[in-house]
Image: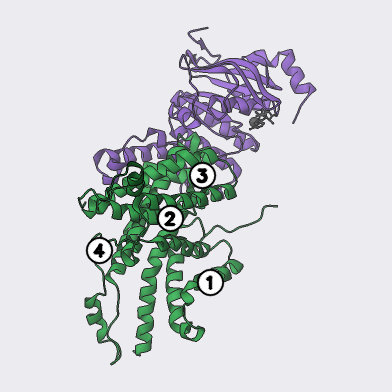
Chain colours: A green, B purple
Amino acid sequence: MSDQFLFGIEVVINGLMAGVLYALVALGFVLIYKASGIFNYAQGVMALFAAMTLVGVMNGQVPFAHLINSILGTDVHHFGWHIPAVIAILMTMAVMILLAWAVQQLVMRHLVNQEPIILFMATIGLAYFLEGFSDLMWGSEIKKLDVGLPQGGSFWIEEMTAGLGGEGFYGFFIDRLDIVATVIAILLVVALMLFSNYTKEGRALRAVADDHQAALSVGVSLNFIWVLVWSVAGFVALVAGIMWGTKSGVQFSLSLIALKALPVLMLGGFTSIPGAIVGGLIIGVGEKLFEFLLGPALGGATENWFAYVLALVFLVFRPQGLFGDKIIERV
Amino acid sequence: MDEGYTTTDGRKIGGVVMEMKNITLRFGGVVAIKDISFDIREGEIRAIIGPNGAGKSSMLNVMSGFYVPQEGEVWFHGKPRPQMKPYQVAQQGIARTFQNIALFEGMSVLDNVMTGRLTQMKSGLFAQAIWKGKAEAEETENREFAEKIIDFLEIQAIRKTPVARLPYGLKKRVELARALAAEPKLLLLDEPMAGMNVEEKEDMSRFILDVNDEFGTTIALIEHDMGVVMDLSDRVVVMDYGQKIGDGTPDDIRNNQAVIDAYLGVSHD
Ligand SMILES: Nc1ncnc2c1ncn2[C@@H]1O[C@H](COP(=O)(O)OP(=O)(O)O)[C@@H](O)[C@H]1O
Ligand SMILES: [Mg+2]
């Protein structure tokens, strides 16, 4: 096998792994969109908030320390303890559930039956609020997140595959974090599928996603389901936040991955969970492969725009996405 | 007749299950229901009839909690019912169908019927997650009940079919199945036979009678076609322009001058 071809394969594999993270963020969007018709612009910021909270809890940071200090004239920053990752993750999840509850009770509840654009605007407001709130609560500096996930290239894979190519090929370089992320993402999707198909709450959620009136008539509280779905989206955001935060540090740019989810959704359709996954993978592989093959000729940094252009091309030919329901105008 | 009565075909009808007391419902300037009272007794088939726009669906929506009347009270099992959300009403054992069919179009027939069991599912999320003992037994039990209803309404052949693909008449039947799956104490049907052909209407009539007979379910049903319900119901409320213009047995109603006028004089169909 030629080395060039092997490098290509490596690019594809790495693209798939990056795609898993895109898919994870897109999944959060799809869940809320399906259940409530809300396009949650704040999904990316939720991932940022989750990651910041996790870091803060693990390091024993005092929340709102800056605020407290400036009001009370104190100088507190840390509780002086460290909390194990597993417990901190559970505590962060509790915070995400609290956030879901607050979003529903304080905002969305009052906007039931409003136009989609109004709901969308509300989530933009939420995104900016949450961003500022995160900074206020945990401070705005870049933080390192380490929950004990393995990182760095897998020497094992490198050694195993080194023999495939010639002199210039040293084996596939695959980040172990990416492998872990992929496994966790697969587990997450399986868990979500089981949840929505085999639990009472999952059935109720699908019912609400399908028809509000009918859901009410079989005894489902829309409010409860919406809190539930924001909580699940919060959980997905937490998982994405952990992965992304471990990879590139917890910082504001994390919330921008939400923008990468947009082309993923255009490809996969806004209402399809398989669509979000496949869409994420296509974008992940597509942008890496495109950069590998044509990047040098186009002056590089094609990853910044490739996804959007691909989505645009897609929109022209299949506006409902890969798996979305076919749009037929009723006349 | 406080302790009930015996129907012409010999069924024992019990005490009052639901009582509507002086219900008034307005939409802006439109008075959809004007000071109407009536009761529904245990085990009976109670019809609400009237021309289109009379306020029948509005009444059913008040009963099921979808609309909140400006005046009046709904009594359930001898107590005034506090203001409730529709899902809370459903949890009290009141199931309903809709005039314009509200099914979960993306789900199969079986899944639709299974959602009717939601009010009967008690296991917590944690128990379900571990999927042990009780939760599993409950799922099996609910599944069996759903299948029983499916057999009862003779829709076995389409149990795996996505509802969106079914013809109108069958959708109505699936909606009834979903309501029955909840084992309701009171079943509210909004024009269950509307838009059906003669054969489908006969099937539906038979099912309604069978439900009442075999499960002892109390049924309130709405129709705008007078003929169909007369054979079916034990007592009939007649509405016109938001007012009650008659209440009694089918024979009483047939001979009621106000009713005859409403139907012959101004047929709004
Ligand atoms: N949600 C609503 N908003 C405004 N007006 C309504 C609403 N529901 C019913 N109405 C009005 O109430 C009146 C009675 O309607 P409805 O109860 O549907 O009658 P029926 O079921 O007997 O045909 C009609 O004038 C209708 O336009
Ligand atoms: Mg009606």
Ligand 2 positioned in quadrant:
top right
Name the mark nearer the viewer: 1 or 3. Answer: 1
Give whichever of B214, A237 is nearer the camera. Answer: A237
Residue B2 higher or lower than A173, as above or below: above
- Most foreground residue, A256 or A186: A256
Q: Give the residue at mark 1.
A: A310
Q: Nearer the viewer, residue A80 or A291?
A: A80
Query: Relative to B50, is B7 on the left or the right?
Result: left
Mark 1 neighbour class, 10 Å CA radius: few under 14, some 14 to 19, many 20 or more: some
Residue at image mark 2? A45
x, y percent for residue B72: 58, 17
Both marks 1 and 3 on one chain: no
Say which element carries label 3. loop
- Look at the numbered disc 4 and give the secondary structure of its residue: loop
Check the residue under mark 2 and report the chain it is in. Answer: A
Which chain contains the residue that carries disc 1?
A
* Mark 3 neighbour class, 10 Å CA radius: few under 14, some 14 to 19, many 20 or more: many
The residue singled out by tag 3 in the image is B104
Could you say which disc has been placed on residue A278 in the image? none
Asked whether the residues under the numbered discs 4 and 1 touch, taking CB atoms below 8 Å apart as contact, a structural biologist would say: no
Alpha-carbon distance for marks 3 and 4? 42 Å
